[in-house]
Amino acid sequence: MFAGDKSLRAGRGRQNMSNTKSDSYWTDHLLRRAGFGTTLQEQSYYRQLGYDGTLNELLHPESVKDDAMEKIVYDQNFDFTDLGDLRRWWIYRMMFSKRPLVEKITLFWHGHFATSNAGKVNSPYSMYQQNLTLRNQGLGNFQDLLMSVSKDPAMIVWLDNQQNTKNKPNENYAREVMELFTMGIGNYSEADVKEAARAFTGWMAPRDFYFNRKQHDTGEKTFLGEKGNFGGEEIVKILAARPETARFISRKLITFFCMDDPSDGFVQKIADTFTSSKQDIRTVMQTIFSSNEFRSDKAYHSKIKSPAEFVIGTMKLLQVDKIDGDLPAVMARMGQNLYEPPNVKGWDGGMSWIATDTLMERFNFAARISTQKFDAKEGYINPTVLASQFGSTSAKDMVDYFLGRLVDEDVPSSARKQLLSYVATNLNGEAVTTMPDAKTLEAKMRGLLHLIMTLPSYQLV
């Protein structure tokens, strides 16, 4: 179903989309990638701002008041020493924040500096503190962020640096900071790992960060061709300034926000921005989102939704604002357990999101959210309200509206015909020519929504 994206994209039959699509079209695309999609009200607001205005607001979250979200979160009275509460806290923020790029970049860095509460850290509050660091510095200077993460208590415990002493160096963090957090494998030697480990000796976290001078190796080190009495700070500065780091971080940002297989030229263009801006992530993100590559057929609907994008995006699209307590578990069954990435590499993304079990979880969630009925419907789907929002007068109107809203009409004509055939019958399967009664309308709308959410194109963002 998802082979190589070609089978999905071949059904569109659209050419030169970047030259023919409207500003609103690309604004919607931006909001799916820089956030988690939009409610109808949010879509209207951002479309009035236009692409450039929306991008400017996303990149300058400090200019946007988010009091309503903060109040919603505050009223939940979350306990940050409870992992379940911590996960729900973040889902609430993803769902209701008026600063979507802040939450999305936090998710990116969570997967990049992948730290798991399971096993070693075992401290939800430490994970909460790390999340705040990623959120507060995620659009700032990379060297500053890397320094903060290197001194983060959860990271120090996760990669064993509290065991890194002058008489018995531990190489875990020294290795991973080069392999996974900065330059990438192949750009350093085993000798560099050993020397960096010596520099990070004495960096500990009994609770907060603590530099134990008695356990620090004060001797001269040779690291990546440079010599000096280096401590951890100097190692971080050297790594952040390396051209290999510029390319490595740029490629990961492009892959997460834009496309899975960027050209070397595109990566180098973003890496040049990373370097010339003195590692300013906000400027890097502006360059990515302003590029022709981002607003191209290659980037459009080219990435498989992560579980966070699938769950939060679905609720936004369908005006669902009731966040059930088990949503973190739902996302975990889809393959993304917040605060517990699978390993230090984080989530692979891409095709790894799609397997028999995880795809079934997506379909189950689609069925649940489209068919859920409660005595009090506030916060959940109300098909009658949805119908009134677009003034449907025929089966064709209904199909066209929801294909536009959920998948930007990005389906083969054969799929649209099948959906139209489904809607244009009553509950007995008999053809109808007028809008059905309220009971049938509700059943058909719920069924239509479920069918659209199981389409291959709905799995793409």
Image: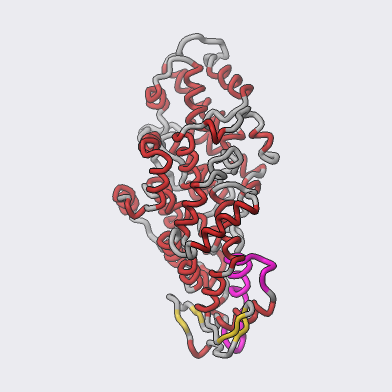
Looking at the image, residue 133 lies above or below residue 301: below
Q: Nearer the viewer, residue 450 or 232?
A: 232
The image quarter in which residue 381 lies: top left
Is 140 included in the stretch rendered in magenta? no
The image quarter in which residue 225 lies: bottom right
Specify the segment rendered in magenta. Answer: 165-188
Quadrant, the C terminus: top right
At 63% from the left edge and 49% from the top edge, which residue is drawn? 262
Looking at the image, residue 12 lies above or below residue 435: below
Q: How far across and down, in percent of the image, does residue 287 sit?
A: 50, 52
Q: How far across and down, in percent of the image, does residue 219 sit?
A: 58, 90
Quadrant, the N terminus: top right
At 64% from the left edge and 44% from the top edge, which residue is drawn? 354
At 42% from the left edge and 65% from the top edge, which residue is drawn? 129
Is 169 included in the stretch rendered in magenta? yes
Would you say residue 317 is visible in this rendering?
yes
